């Protein structure tokens, strides 16, 4: 099977796209063409794939990237048996002549608008209906896979879930240390940037440092640089997922301080599963799925939502308790690893993911069984971008 995988929004080293899905396809013996913003992200394409470089879509100016993606997709799908797209933006760039097409729904796009600081207020009311219209149109013409069970409520059909599990080491990871706290992932205000910096400030007198591993929104970069200059933390910027997780091993705790916003409320933060997989006790805010997972596995501490000082204070108390309880934190790390190995190991989900794509690639039509492919009279149009075409 020849698969064209495409993104213009995500980093070419995105864990879900590259280190899980593309890796699974390659290991199953399939050929992959990967359309991604390699140059923009300063990434050299991995061996074993055919790479197509495209501009990255970011902020309010996405029209040029979507237009370029349309031309690139026409090249990418010429010999493909299946097209797998990872961005809602690419639904506006699909070529008319294409193989069966799959949209991997990564997030609640409309819900995520709340944390997009660059959006003017005038667009916040206009965009959600447009996004829902694009999603509805895509459901009638494409196959869908969902990253979360909670996304089912947004669609009429019954679409398979491909969860954000991770590769879990079979051997027990090293036990947690006593002088380092980590965060792995994108850094933003809604992901707790201010809370983590304040916690680092309060942990420094105790000889505990904070390592931040991941890219950051422009709005929080100045405060991160200032905190690093003060010696409060080490910010490493973007690091490929497999290397980032190795860097995190042996930490006293892994932080997940997501705010209570719609896009996070019904999701299981992947970073929590990754901390568990690598034997790192978790400190998380009480998002329902996160709190349930950590509580069930007994692998960490839940701290309350609140103002920055309140959350930072709770984090510091949780971290100091872990530091003073060597046996307790080792047990948390071991329980988390066992839970991840038994229930969240990606290779199990990978087999089902690949098998599903193989079936769709062999189908005579890309239309899901959930709804008939009835014509839609109204086309979804956004200035500067193309229509979502029917096949």
Image (tube, rainbow, N blue to C red):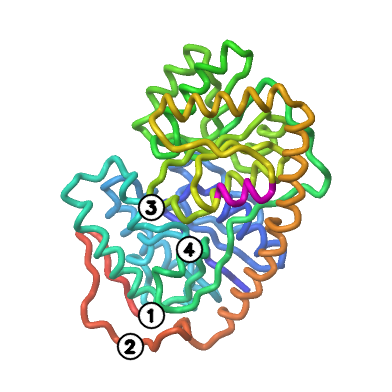
* Residue 69 among magenta residues: no
In whole angstroms, how far apart are the C-alphas of marks 1 and 2?
8 Å
Judging by the rendered image, the residue that carries numbered circle 3 is 262
- Compared with 372, 387 (above or below) is above
**Total tally of numbered discs in the picture:** 4
Which is more foreground, mark 2 or mark 3? 3
Of the numbered discs 4 and 3, the one sitting upstream in the chain is 4
202 or 190: which is nearer to us? 202
Magenta stretch, main secondary structure class: helix
- Compared with 267, 117 (above or below) is above
Residue 237 position, x and y percent, is 51, 31
| Other residues around mark 2 within 10 Å, as few (<14) / some (14–19) / many (≥20) | few
* CB-based contact (under 8 Å), mark 1 and mark 2: yes
Q: Which mark, by number, is residue 150?
A: 4
Of the numbered discs 1 and 4, the one sitting upstream in the chain is 1
Judging by the rendered image, the residue that carries numbered circle 2 is 374
Q: Which mark, by number, is residue 140?
A: 1
33 or 87: which is nearer to us? 87
Residue 220 position, x and y percent, is 38, 29
In whole angstroms, how far apart are the C-alphas of marks 1 and 4?
20 Å
Of the numbered discs 2 and 4, the one sitting upstream in the chain is 4
Q: In the displayed structure, does residue 107 sit left or right of residue 292?
A: left
Q: Residue at x 20, y 52 (%)?
A: 123
Magenta segment boundaries in residue numbering = 290-297
* CB-based contact (under 8 Å), mark 2 and mark 3: no
* CB-based contact (under 8 Å), mark 2 and mark 4: no
Residue 260 position, x and y percent, is 41, 45
| Other residues around mark 3 within 10 Å, as few (<14) / some (14–19) / many (≥20) | some
Which is more foreground, mark 1 or mark 4? 4
In whole angstroms, how far apart are the C-alphas of marks 2 and 4?
26 Å
Q: Secondary structure at mark 4?
A: helix
In whole angstroms, how far apart are the C-alphas of marks 2 and 3?
31 Å
């Amino acid at each position: 099977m020849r698969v064209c995988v495409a993104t213009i929004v995500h980093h070419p080293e995105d864990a879900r796209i590259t280190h899980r899905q593309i890796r699974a396809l390659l290991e199953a013996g399939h050929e992959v063409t990967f359309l991604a913003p390699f140059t923009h992200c300063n990434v050299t394409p991995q061996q074993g794939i055919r790479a197509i470089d495209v501009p990255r879509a970011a902020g309010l100016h996405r029209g040029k990237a979507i237009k370029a993606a349309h031309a690139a997709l026409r090249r990418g799908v010429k010999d493909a048996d299946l097209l797998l797209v990872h961005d809602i933006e690419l639904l506006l760039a699909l070529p008319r002549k294409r193989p069966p097409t799959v949209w991997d729904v990564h997030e609640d796009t409309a819900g995520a608008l709340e944390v997009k600081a660059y959006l003017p207020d005038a667009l916040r009311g206009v965009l959600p209906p447009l996004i829902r219209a694009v999603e509805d149109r895509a459901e009638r013409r494409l196959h869908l896979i969902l990253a979360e069970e909670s996304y089912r409520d947004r669609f009429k059909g019954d679409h398979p879930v491909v969860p954000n599990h991770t590769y879990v080491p079979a051997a027990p990871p090293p036990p947690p240390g006593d002088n380092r706290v980590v965060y792995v992932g994108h850094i933003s205000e809604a992901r707790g940037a201010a809370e983590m910096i304040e916690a680092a400030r309060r942990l420094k007198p105790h000889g505990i440092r904070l390592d931040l591993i991941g890219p950051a929104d422009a709005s929080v970069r100045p405060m991160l640089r200032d905190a690093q200059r003060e010696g409060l933390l080490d910010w490493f910027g973007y690091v490929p997922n497999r290397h980032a997780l190795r860097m995190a091993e042996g930490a006293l705790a892994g932080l997940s301080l997501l705010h209570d916003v719609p896009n996070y409320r019904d999701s299981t933060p992947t970073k929590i599963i990754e901390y568990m997989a690598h034997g790192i006790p978790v400190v998380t805010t009480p998002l329902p799925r996160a709190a349930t997972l950590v509580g069930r596995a007994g692998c960490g501490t839940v701290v309350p939502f609140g103002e920055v000082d309140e959350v930072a204070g709770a984090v510091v108390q949780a971290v100091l308790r872990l530091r003073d309880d060597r046996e307790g934190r080792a047990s948390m790390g071991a329980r988390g690893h066992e839970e991840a190995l038994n229930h969240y190991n990606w290779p199990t989900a990978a087999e089902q993911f690949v098998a599903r794509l193989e079936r769709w690639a062999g189908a005579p039509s890309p239309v899901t069984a959930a709804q008939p492919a009835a014509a839609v009279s109204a086309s979804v149009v956004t200035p500067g971008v193309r229509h979502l075409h029917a096949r």
